[in-house]
Image (spheres, rainbow, N blue to C red):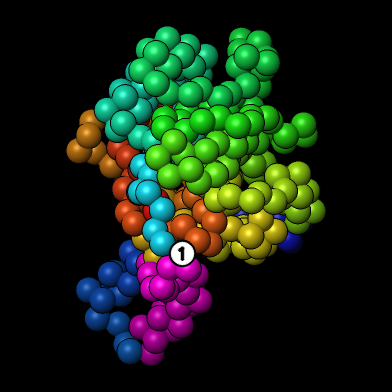
């Protein structure tokens, strides 16, 4: 493993490292160690914890335009070891979301959505119509589910698992672009990969809402550059860190939310939009936690 790869991996693991420092701090406190040792501990903790601070600080800005109609969004990576799609389907149905963005969708979940939710007015955009769902790679099983929008265009990027839908709101007439994305693991690619993905996604003359499994943490320089390339902002910043991986598999209790250390499921939105609320979902059978967001 090269030094740069090692640094990248350690950066991804910054949250569990900070948790370890916290445990050490508690032990040092009860042992009543000298102040010099506590000072050294604090000096080491500060640079590790610094990147998290900004994600809990809500930068208040006046909206550049009148607020858009609030939109309810659900995000979920659906895969896990022997994934059970029934809790995810129930969450989609119960949430009555305007937008549902899924990655690694199972064939069972896709056909259940198509059979039960499309007749209720949802527009289903996915790759399942173009590929054999039994053989096509699970990373590329992307789904965009919308309600209350006229679909203008839908397509997948040629070289990357990115599903894009252009739509127009029936209520406001505003144009939106909804994107479900699944990026490669950060230690398997370099900075040119993110630039290429962003260039293929391109510009849009309406508002963009993008969510996906980014496989990188939000304090990574690659993540920040990717946002800059797209001209989008972090929709979770100041609202929630949303540590999403790993989630306990096949555990569907609404009251149980085990710790997760990697906030790799992210939401990006246009600068004119704002996130009003974010809530992490319980474990739904996938090895990722999903989230709900209210966007206006």
Residue beneath the point at 75% across and 53% down: 195
Residue beneath the point at 58% across and 58% down: 232
Q: Position of residue 253 (x, y in %)?
A: 23, 31
Residue beneath the point at 51% across and 30% down: 150
Q: Position of residue 104 (x, y in %)?
A: 55, 27
The secondary element bearing badge 1 is classed as loop
284 vs 187: above or below? above
Q: Which residues are magenta?
A: 36-64
Which residue occupies the foreground of this view, 131 or 257? 131
Decide if residue 29 is on the left or right side of residue 163. left
Decide if residue 151 is on the left or right side of residue 140. left
Magenta stretch, overall SS: helix
Q: Residues within 10 Å of mark 1 (few under 14, many from 20)?
A: few
49 drawn magenta: yes
Q: Is residue 193 visible?
A: no
5 vs 157: above or below? below
Which residue occupies the foreground of this view, 30 or 177? 177
Q: Position of residue 109 (x, y in %)?
A: 45, 17
13 drawn magenta: no
Q: Position of residue 218 (x, y in %)?
A: 54, 58
Residue beneath the point at 66% across and 49% down: 204
Decide if residue 48 is on the left or right side of residue 242. right
**Mark 1 — residue?**
65
Q: Is residue 199 visible?
A: yes
- Residue 161: image quadrant is top right
Which residue occupies the foreground of this view, 47 or 230? 230
- Residue 180: image quadrant is top right
Q: Residue furthest left?
A: 255
């Amino acid at each position: 493993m090269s030094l740069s790869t090692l640094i990248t991996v350690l950066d991804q693991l910054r949250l569990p490292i900070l948790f370890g420092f916290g445990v050490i701090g508690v032990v040092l406190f009860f042992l009543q160690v000298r102040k010099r040792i506590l000072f050294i501990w604090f000096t080491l903790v500060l640079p590790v914890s610094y990147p998290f601070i900004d994600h809990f600080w809500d930068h208040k800005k006046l909206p550049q335009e009148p607020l858009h109609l609030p939109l309810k969004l659900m995000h979920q990576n659906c895969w896990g070891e022997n994934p059970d799609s029934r809790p995810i389907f129930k969450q989609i149905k119960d949430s009555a979301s305007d937008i549902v963005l899924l990655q690694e969708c199972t064939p069972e979940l896709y056909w259940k959505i198509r059979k039960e939710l499309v007749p209720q007015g949802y527009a289903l955009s996915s790759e399942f119509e173009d590929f054999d769902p039994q053989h096509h790679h699970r990373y590329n099983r992307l789904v965009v589910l919308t309600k209350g929008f006229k679909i203008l265009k839908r397509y997948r990027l040629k070289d990357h698992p990115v599903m894009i839908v252009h739509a127009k709101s029936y209520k406001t007439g505003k144009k939106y672009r909804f994107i479900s994305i699944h990026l490669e693991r950060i230690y398997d690619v370099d900075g040119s990969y993110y630039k290429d993905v962003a260039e293929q996604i391109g510009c849009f003359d309406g508002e963009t809402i993008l969510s996906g499994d980014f496989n990188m943490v939000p304090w990574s320089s690659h993540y920040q550059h990717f946002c800059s390339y797209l001209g989008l902002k972090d929709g979770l910043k100041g609202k929630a860190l949303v540590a999403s991986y790993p989630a306990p598999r096949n555990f569907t209790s609404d009251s149980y939310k085990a710790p997760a250390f990697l906030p790799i499921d992210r939401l990006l939105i246009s600068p004119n939009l704002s996130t009003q609320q974010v809530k992490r979902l319980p474990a739904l059978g996938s090895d990722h936690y999903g989230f709900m967001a209210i966007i206006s």
